[in-house]
Amino acid sequence: GPAVVHHTYDVVVIGAGGAGLRAAIEARMRGKRVAILSKSLFGKAHTVMAEGGIAASMGNANSRDNWEVHYRDTMRGGKFLNNWRMAELHAKEAPQRVWELETYGALFDRTPEGKISQRNFGGHQFPRLAHVGDRTGLELIRTLQQKIVSLQQEDQARTGDHESDLRVFHEFTVTELIKDGDRVAGAFGYRRPTGEYVCFHAAAVVLATGGIGKSFKVTSNSWEYTGDGHALALRAGARLINMEFVQFHPTGMVWPPSVKGILVTESVRGDGGVLKNSEGERFMFRYIPDVFREQYATNEDEADRWYTDADNNRRPPELLPRDEVARAINNEVKEGRGSPAGGVFLDIASRRTTEFITKRLPSMYHQFKELADVDITAEPMEVGPTCHYVMGGIEVEPDTAATAVPGLFAAGEVAGGMHGSNRLGGNSLSDLLVFGCRAGAGAADYLDALSGAPAVSDEAVDAALAAAERPFTAMSERGGGEENAYTLHQELQQTMNDLVGIIRRADEMEMALKRLAELRDRIPRVGVSGGRAYNPGWHLALDLRNMLMVSECIAVSALERQESRGGHTRDDYPAMDENWRLELLNCSLVDDEVELGHQPQPAMRADLFDLFELDELKKYYTGDELGGHRAGQG
Ligand code: FAD
């Protein structure tokens, strides 16, 4: 068969987004030799697309902000399903991670006094998102890359080779993790431009592959988001949790069709934009749920005053958490009050000056001008929900980012738990840095304690090679591909969009599972012709099995959870059920089939529990649990 090139490192980081780069930096700073692998070009990771900002309670815009307030907001946003330890670490460490970025060279927007500026976002009580216009992700990636280059320069001075201790392999797709017994031993994959196979030997592997959006038809996600890390972890024996929770961002572009799903940042609303239906009504006031009633303004005057006097007014309902806004938009359209292209109107033109809009939202201005021929300083945008983020992911140990597989770590969007049933905007970029750093440290500590390095066997490499070659062999053995990768991908996306989308019902999800089972039979029959060099049909054929596996996890979990919570909305079970808060759903792979399991939600530590008022907890908790609260103990 084809030749396989071998490389050996201490740590292999799969993914060059915020989580992967921060993990690689940490592992290298702890003296490990690190390889960074990324499917796309270096600098093109999904993180680069992040617009609004990074959430950290630095208290620059409102000195009353602190980690406890951020922690409470995060738990509320996730409807208390979050892993509380992750939410605690995240809230406490996010400010340090942002300040540290400045030492790497980041240039954030400033307040008049010269502090890092912080903007408002949905679900955050205070202005909390550090930002660079609406291009924050670009600055984050640029800065982390710059730090990597500076570490490489140190290595050059020390070893004479700038890539001796930290090397980037871009346009490299990992198709399989390699194990030795229980432990991870490396990763196998191919170079996209040449099709050359490479096996990396490493006792520690960090998965930082991002999300799953390409399983859905309408999504803000780019081509890379095929759930590879989720599927690699499953196949290696790790577990996924919370997979029923997929975030539909309320505002994606709906027109023209070619750009449907592309994100319209929440900053438009944070900076004063409002949502209107076809009758010109600012409809969000009708959609404030009971659990949030006290925090949100009930009329337009109060909502508008909040932008200049947040201490004495309540927030506009356009800034409710994303799940609430997405459902409201969905409902307006369903009831016939949608815009011509099937969304609703997002209006900032009538509310802010042209100068303000072009300064604060330059990317949005250009995006609409170029893609839709709409001038957002003069006319409203048309927007609707788009699949944006997966809360579910690999189950990790919060402090170390370790998975159940020894040597395998996970951080960023691919990891689960931190955001519970719904993520707040801005809490991903901070998550990447906090847990990316912890994963790098976790991997280094694991290596320091390791006795006897795991080995990569020839059999394991042969098996990975055969799996990667399968689309070619299917073609040559049968003399023609029985199935086409693009067709199957479209069917998969349509199924997930229509039957496991923003509003779910048992009968539709059962239908989805049936269709997914059919696709599972058909995907191995995909045949690919041509060579291995830059062959997108082949790439898609390999990605498809990952997308399918992730879709099955989402569908079985969504069917099982008989309540509505956060990103999971059931038409047939519209209420949130306090007993379901105690249950986490997990997925593992048994004999190559997705198996669903239940596990209990660990009780929140007492001092964190006491950060909330009893009256608020009553909305989410069972009576039995509330006895442990300070107020209940006299
Ligand atoms: P990514 O940045 O996506 O990196 C994944 C990496 O893994 C890539 O390098 C990819 O090539 C690589 N990879 C994947 N599969 C493989 C494989 N098989 N082999 C090798 N490499 C692989 N969050 C916020 O907090 N604030 C925001 O303002 C914000 N705005 C957003 C705007 C948009 C348009 C989108 C789509 C998301 C936004 N988010 C925002 C969410 C946030 O950007 C992402 O959740 C986050 O960037 C994910 O980072 P990551 O490091 O986990 O993964």
Image (tube, grey):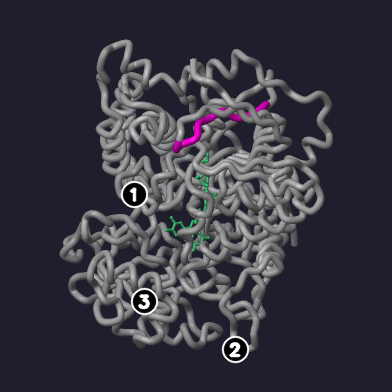
Give yes or no for residue 190 being in the magenta stretch. yes
Name which quarter of the figure residue 274 lies in: bottom left
Residue picked out by circle 3: 273
Gap between marks 2 and 3, in whole Å?
A: 23 Å
Residue drawn where x is 64% and y is 88% of the image = 113
Q: In the figure, 524 relative to 8: above or below?
A: above
Label number found at residue 502? 1
Marked residue nearer the N-terminal end (1 or 2): 2
Could you say which disc has been placed on residue 112 in the image? 2
Seen from the viewer's position, the closer of residues 157 and 126 is 157
Residue 315's tag is none
* Above or below: residue 556 compared with residue 168: above
Left or right? Give the position of 626 relative to 353: right
Callout 2 amino acid:
Pro
User: As rendered, which of 546 and 552 lies closer to the eye?
Assistant: 546
Where 438 falls versus 446 (above or below)? below
Residue type beneath disc 1: Ile
- Range of the magenta residues? 185-193
Can residue 560 be seen by looking at this rendering? no
